[in-house]
Image (cartoon, rainbow, N blue to C red):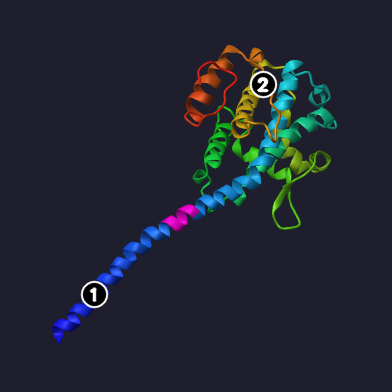
Amino acid sequence: MSETWLAVFTAAVSGGIIAKLIDYPVEWIKYYFGQRKSAKSLVDAHLDPLLKAADAIVGKTSSLADRDFSIDSEQQEASSTAPLDPDLIGLTYLYARFWGRINILAEESLGISLASDKRGAKLQKFIACLGSPQIRLVNRTHQNAIGELATDPSYDGRHRTIGLVEFGKKISEDSSAAAWCKPLIELLGKTKIKATRQQLLVYGVVAHALVDTLDPEHQSTHPRPPYSNKLSKAAVRQIERLVFGEYLKDIGARNQYTIEQ
């Protein structure tokens, strides 16, 4: 009798262990494919508006490069109390909207591994590059705040990016909003300085690569030629060694600006 009960007990224990050993890989597989599905859905929802926002920056940067960054910023430089120039507001808005899309993606991707989707993994690399100390236009705190100013909660509780008129009114009438935007506005108002122009051009190169890489057929964006002739030798070295040689290495990033890829 004791041997019978021992056999039953042993079978129950071993059966439970085997069941657990089977459960673990099954649960992991469910989790893995669930993460991939979640990441894919998230990228599907956010990639198009983010690419359109990046494409707008590329288009404006190309246009400014063609006319050597001739923008009417003298009014803003003359007096900090003068009304913001409409051109300067419009230029500020392009970056604010792009950073707003990055903020929304970051908020809605909490608990989801974007890297489990191939496009999401590439997008993370581009966002990290654009936010790096050598490439970014303002520090992370101001970038996040400026992006936040370009978004508002929508009817369903999620966030949306606001329009240019609404953004312009916000930073013109709200002193706190204007203060957060001040570092970017001051930078964009100093395009007569060569270093500033090169900083904006390099940022535009990364945005250009983002668009070309994640929308190679340009279904949502516009195919644009490079503005390599406007880049200094130092900027080209930075793009070649830091941007494509380090941050965007091995992800198949499309590069129109340097020979080595």
- Magenta span of residues: 29-33
Q: x, y percentage for residue 157? A: 71, 57
Q: Is residue 32 magenta?
A: yes
Between residues 182 and 242, which one lies in front from this camera angle? 242
Please give left or right for residue 47 compared with residue 23 in the image.
right
Q: Residue at x 61, y 51 (%)?
A: 108
Tag 2 residue: 196
SS class, disc 1: helix
Of tags 2 and 1, which is closer to the observer? 1
Residue 222, labelled with which disc? none
In the figure, 186 relative to 171: above or below?
A: above
- Quarter of the image for residue 90 reads top right
Marks 2/1: CA distance? Answer: 74 Å
Between residues 92 and 53, which one lies in front from this camera angle? 53
- Quarter of the image for residue 92 reads top right
- Quarter of the image for residue 84 reads top right
Q: x, y percentage for residue 37? A: 54, 52
Furthest-bottom residue in this view = 1
Q: Is residue 126 magenta?
A: no
Are there few (<14), some (14-19), or many (20+) residues within 10 Å of tag 2?
some
SS class, disc 2: helix
Q: Residue at x 42, y 60 (%)?
A: 27
Q: Residue at x 46, y 58 (%)?
A: 30
In the figure, 125 relative to 198: above or below?
A: below
Residue 11, labelled with which disc? 1
Please give left or right for residue 177 compared with residue 196 in the image.
right
Residue 85 appearing in the image = no
**Amino acid type for the residue under numbered disc 1:** Ala
